[in-house]
Image (cartoon, rainbow, N blue to C red):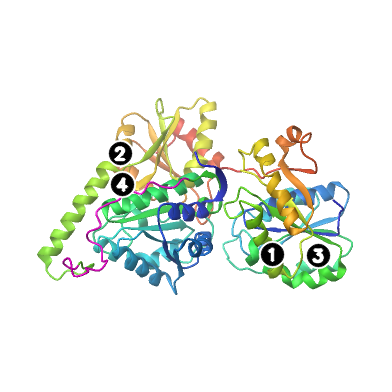
């Protein structure tokens, strides 16, 4: 996948956008780009980009997010510094968009600038193990709703199908057909398939364009 | 076994309710349970069900009362401050002996509090939320799978005993994602001859009402209701025992706290400390016997809670304070870490608890 200045991850809520965004930002940093990660999620109260703030900081990645993220305030606001993504052309930005069309509304504010600059990739994250996106058709409906709400068009698809910690190699391979079908009906390329790092070696001979993910650790 | 899907706890509750035959949902949005309403809004119209966002929590619980009167499965969901608003309706449901399912995905309080997880509505749920003598069956899930299975169970118990079942979860349980397998629930059919469904001029009319003008009659209604509650206490207690066989220290925890506690217990066992856990699954009826019996075996108890110490009172009550009970807690939206629980276990092991 060709690296663009701005990479946006959007999709159904719970599809795994935040995790991919954090991993992708770290990937870009390793490639040598100056990177900021921008959390545009105005929907989700828990499990946010901010949970990875320490790790991001350690790697020299700036985090732009609502000043109320992970606090007790339920205010869907975005900070002024979000405009850095648009105006500072020297940086590479990863944008984590909130779930569904409701979350994608926040992107609308930045859509004209991003479209004008025309140096972005907007990727639809699909997990076919999520109950409301079990197949290509259901995922496609959400893809279109997000485009409508954000005023932007997707440029590619990511197959992030997983069952959390119990995901097997077979689970991932079993969704290949739906991912290809989604690519076909949307006319968008399947950019990569994600895989939890420990499964990467098992899968790399059987599947191409794999992107290894490190998951956040849990205390419960 | 049905195919597994990856779900948020809140979604699992919603889907399980649909599988249990619930086709009526009334609610009002509040973090961190909004996904239940959002899921119902998407799904109910597609299956001929009714999703209605009421104008307030008070309206929603009274809509629940209306549908419950017809004997149909009905539910509402909210988070702590919203449940307080529904308290009046819960009392009316109890006074009319109506079955319903109410979900509380708790957040920090009191007052508006915050949006992060909490277990500080234990008193509210188990000691009666509204006015009058009544009980609710209170179910405390500890995994996304249990969010689903206890929802199905909750509908069943509600109808069986004509009372409200409450799912008492917390924000983390509602928001976290885990694999779940969902199967069509086997729906038991219970006597609904009390339901208001139209007499067709063929039977005496049914009246659903919580007002009773004659004190002698109201007393009898209360007696009869408590006979039913007694049956619930005898038959429906659920709990999980974890490594209790040789335990000298007993951790008590439910919901999210039990998950953290389990991790701490594993580490403590590695250090050679004999510690186990009793995890109440029904908070009412409380697993009295399990604690009573444990009190004769263990040296001390530790209650791990996301509250200032609420369940700890029941533990002291039902162990007759035979052994010391200490509290390991975080509040205000914070979750105790496994290390904090482990430290409490170590202290208890040294006999440092008073």
Could you say which is closer to the camera, residue B286 or residue B193? Answer: B193
Q: Which mark is drawn over residue A85?
A: 3
Q: Which residues are magenta?
A: B183-205
Q: Which residue is mark 2?
A: B319
Q: Is residue B88 visible?
A: no
Q: Where does label 1 land, which residue?
A: A144
Image mark 2: chain: B
Return the x and y of residue B232 as percentages of the image width and height.
Answer: 26, 47
Residue A209, picture quadrant = top right
Q: Say which residue appears at 47% left-offset and 50% top-offset.
A: B306
For label 4, the residue is B285
Chain bearing tag 1 is: A
Residues tagged 3 and 2 counted as in contact (Cβ below 8 A): no
Mark 3 to mark 2 CA distance (whole Å): 60 Å
Q: Secondary structure at mark 2?
A: loop
Left or right of A159 on screen, residue A2? right
């Amino acid at each position: 996948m060709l690296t663009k200045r701005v990479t946006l991850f959007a999709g159904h809520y719970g599809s795994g956008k935040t995790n991919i965004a954090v991993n992708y930002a770290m990937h870009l940093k390793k490639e040598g780009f100056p990177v900021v990660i921008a959390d545009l999620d105005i929907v989700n109260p828990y499990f946010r980009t901010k949970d990875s703030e320490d790790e991001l900081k350690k790697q020299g990645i700036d985090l732009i997010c609502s000043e109320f993220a992970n606090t007790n305030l339920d205010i869907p606001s975005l900070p002024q510094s979000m405009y850095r993504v648009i105006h500072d052309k020297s940086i590479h930005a990863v944008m984590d968009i909130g779930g569904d069309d409701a979350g994608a509304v926040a992107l609308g504010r930045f859509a004209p600038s991003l479209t004008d600059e025309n140096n972005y990739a907007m990727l639809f994250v699909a997990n076919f193990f999520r109950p409301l996106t079990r197949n290509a058709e259901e995922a496609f409906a959400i893809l279109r709703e997000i485009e409508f709400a954000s005023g932007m068009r997707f440029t590619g698809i990511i197959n992030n199908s997983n069952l959390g910690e119990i995901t097997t190699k077979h689970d991932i391979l079993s969704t290949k057909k739906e991912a290809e079908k989604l690519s076909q009906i949307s006319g968008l390329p399947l950019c990569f398939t994600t895989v939890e790092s420990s499964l990467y070696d098992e899968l790399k001979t059987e599947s191409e364009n794999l992107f290894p993910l490190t998951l956040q650790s849990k205390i419960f | 076994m049905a195919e597994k899907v990856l779900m948020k706890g809140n979604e699992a509750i919603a889907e399980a309710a649909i599988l249990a035959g619930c086709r009526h949902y009334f609610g009002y949005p509040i973090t961190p349970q909004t996904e239940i309403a959002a899921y119902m809004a998407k799904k109910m119209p597609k299956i001929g069900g009714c999703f209605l966002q009421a104008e307030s929590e008070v309206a929603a619980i009274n809509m629940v009362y209306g549908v419950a009167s017809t004997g149909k499965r009905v539910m509402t969901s909210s988070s702590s401050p919203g449940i307080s608003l529904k308290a009046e309706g819960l009392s009316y449901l109890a006074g009319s002996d109506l079955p319903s399912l109410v979900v509380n995905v708790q957040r920090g309080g009191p007052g508006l509090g915050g949006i992060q997880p909490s277990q500080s509505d234990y008193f509210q749920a188990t000691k009666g939320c509204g006015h009058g003598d009544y009980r609710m069956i209170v179910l405390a899930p500890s995994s996304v799978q249990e969010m689903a299975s206890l929802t199905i169970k909750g509908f069943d118990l509600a109808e069986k005993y004509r009372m409200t079942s409450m799912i008492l979860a917390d924000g983390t349980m509602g928001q976290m994602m885990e694999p779940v397998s969902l199967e069509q629930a086997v729906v038991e059919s219970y006597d609904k001859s009390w339901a208001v469904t139209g007499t067709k001029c063929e039977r005496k009319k049914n009246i659903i009402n919580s007002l009773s003008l004659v004190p002698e009659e109201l007393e009898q209604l209360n007696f009869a209701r408590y006979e039913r509650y007694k049956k619930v206490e005898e038959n429906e207690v659920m709990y999980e025992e974890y490594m209790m066989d040789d335990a000298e220290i007993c951790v008590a925890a439910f919901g999210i706290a039990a998950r953290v506690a389990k991790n701490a217990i594993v580490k403590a066992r590695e250090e050679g400390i004999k510690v186990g856990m009793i995890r109440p699954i029904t908070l009412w009826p409380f697993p009295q016997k399990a604690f009573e019996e444990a009190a004769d075996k263990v040296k001390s108890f530790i209650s791990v809670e996301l509250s200032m110490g609420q369940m700890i009172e029941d533990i002291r009550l039902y162990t007759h304070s035979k052994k010391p009970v200490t509290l390991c807690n975080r509040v205000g939206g914070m979750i105790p870490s496994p290390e904090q629980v482990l430290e409490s276990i170590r202290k208890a092991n040294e006999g440092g608890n008073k």
